[in-house]
Image (cartoon, helix red, strand yellow):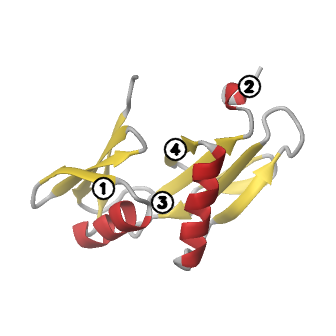
Amino acid sequence: MTSFHYAFLVRDLATTRAFYRDLIGCREGRSSATWVDFDFFGHQISAHLGEPSLSPSALGEVDGTAVPMPHFGAILDWDRFEALADTLRAAGTDFVLPPQVRFRGQAGEQATMFLLDPSGNALEFKAFRDPAQVFGA
């Protein structure tokens, strides 16, 4: 399996751990006083102390819906997506775009949700009804 690595800035490691490890369920990896790694659904993300330069007010349009740009996230299987959505709802998450299904009953049917981490980094989680449709065609 090939994994990606993504490093990004966060304002505080304690709230970052509470969000990625405790709420999202990412296993914590190595860390220091200024950064922490997480197993983000099989990929390595590294949260480094600093002032995030991303602007959650920057928006792009996807099928007529404004979504935060840039963003990162994970494509999950359908059941894992629903479980994560339930966990986030129960925690009172303030979604940018709440969990919903796009292209219902069509090729490419997908569940999606957008949210911000405590530092304002935008995340999207997705699931495809048919995983073979991830790249379309």
Residue 76 pos. (x, y %): 57, 43
Amino acid type shown at disc 2: Gly
Q: Is residue 24 left or right of residue 11?
A: right
Mark 1 burial class by Cα count in 10 Å: few <14, some 14-19, many 20+: some
Across and down, in percent, residue 96 comes to 62, 66
Badge 3 or badge 4: first in the primary sequence: 3
Disc 3 to disc 2: CB gap under 8 Å:
no
Disc 1 + disc 4, Cβ < 8 Å? no
Badge nearest the viewer, 3 or 4: 4
Give the residue displayed 30% in from the left and 62% down from the top: 10
Which sits earlier in the primary sequence, circle 1 or circle 4? Answer: 1
Q: Is residue 106 above or below residue 73?
A: above
Give the percent coordinates (x, y) of residue 104.
86, 46
- The residue that mark 3 highlights is 55
At horizontal 55% and vertical 74% (from top left) the residue drawn is 93
As drawn, the label of residue 136 is 2
Image quadrant holding the N terminus, namely top left
Within 10 Å of disc 3 (Cα), the crowding (few <14, some 14-19, many 20+) is few
Whole-Å distance between the Cαs marked 3 and 4? 20 Å
Q: Which residue is mark 4?
A: 74
Q: Is residue 4 left or right of residue 134?
A: left
In the rendered structure, find residue 9 and report the number of the disc placed on it: 1
